[in-house]
Image (cartoon, grey):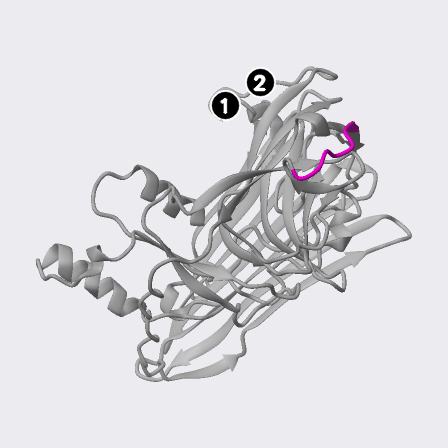
Amino acid sequence: YCRTVFRLMETLQGPRKGLVGPWAHKYPHAGKPGPAIGWHAEERRWWDQWLKGHETGIMDEPQLRLYMQDHAEPASYYERRDGRWIEEPSWPSSNVNRTPFRLGADGTLALEGAEEPELGKLTIRSPMGVGIAGGKWCSYAKPGDQPVDQRRDDAGSLVFETEPLAEPLEIAGDAALELTFAVDRQVAQVAVRLVDVAQDGAATRVSYGLLNLTHRDSHETPEELIPGQTYTARVPFKHVAQTFRAGHRLRLAVSTSYFPVGWPSPEPVTLTLDTADTRLILPVRGPDSGPPPRDLGVPLDIAPMQAETLRPANADWTVTENLATGAVQIEITDDGGSFRIADSGMTFGGATVETYGFDEGDWGSFCARIVSDFALSRDDWSITTLTETDFSATPTHFRIRARLIAHEGDHIAHQRTWDCEIPREKA
């Protein structure tokens, strides 16, 4: 949710501080990918300043602190990301310049004004499997949920790429694609990815963005597209601070679907991109100025809770492709294991399995199923919960079917089912 931090720094009127690290959906003192920081001390400085009236010096420091990530080989899990902390006095920052790059019809990507690219219109109708290498929408730093090598997804995308960089390039903030396009359907989606291409060709996703093109002017009042008509749209990327090394290439990839990160449009879409009026806008950051940021310290050394492992935790991410039938299935396992707390004797555990799939060539076959169970017990008392949710869609409706069942011991304490159809309405 990094975009929220930048939006708050820009619009809040009262005292405010922003901190964005390389972490997945975890607190900074337990953050992975690392480095984790002494978050408790940072919190205390803030609360002592504003609740106790103690002068801690926190408001004398720059408003926003970001972790500038260095290059990382593509991997589904990182224990740590190399990089350094940077600071900005405010947001937007005068040290960040929104810099346009031109797209060439020959697949080139170059700084505007550096050279005149070949211009023209390019079309893309992405295969259903684009997005399989995309990881999870909200990573929890579990093996499998970071995006892997992007070359597979790039094969089903329009790709634009710079020459090898003569010197390092750093960005901080939200890139955007200012897109001029036409489509052949009334409802269409576009996915954009910013990729760091190493000298050996390995492709690491840096950031991405998704836009339902019926929302090109407004999320509140979306409007259907007229096939063949030319439109413009601004597609924002997720905020990030990233270094592109000298010798690496910067790649922009554009596709018309990105499943399972985003649910696809009702029908396959052919998108025509006009390179003459399309720009990639990068938030290029200038060199560091001023003293290095204050060290954020290390997490408190707190003894872990004493617990007996009854079933070890396990995380897995499996993609199965049946070349005979065209069936593709993605199964994501997040098994938290089962443990008994030594002090209380309480036993707890649970697991979630997400399954996403489609049949190649059948645009109506996209589906999702999520099953979660949880259990608590102590002595002769126990409770369990089970939820099962199935999601599918037709060209006109989304369908959600779900079941919840809760037990206390062998007795059903509560159960409920849902079967809902929701009109797609330009989705």
Point 59% across, 38% down: residue:
210
Which residue was labeled with disc 1? 218
- Observer-nearest of 340 and 286: 286
Position of 392 relative to 302 (above/below) = above
Q: Are marks 2 and 1 in contact (CB under 8 Å)?
A: yes
Position of 298 relative to 198 (above/below) = below
Q: Is residue 364 left or right of residue 215?
A: right
Magenta part of the chain: 114-121
Q: Position of residue 16 (x, y in %)?
A: 25, 48
Q: Quadrant of residue 41?
A: bottom left
- Observer-nearest of 184 and 320: 184
- The amino acid pointed to by label 1 is Ser
Residue 117 among those drawn in magenta:
yes
Q: Position of residue 374 (x, y in %)?
A: 47, 63
Q: Is residue 164 left or right of residue 308?
A: right
Quarter of the image with the C terminus in it: top right
- The amino acid pointed to by label 2 is Glu
Which residue was labeled with disc 2? 223
Q: Main secondary structure of the magenta part?
A: loop
Q: Position of residue 227 (x, y in %)?
A: 73, 17
Residue 312 among those drawn in magenta:
no
Q: Secondary structure at mark 2?
A: loop
Point 74% across, 53% down: residue:
329
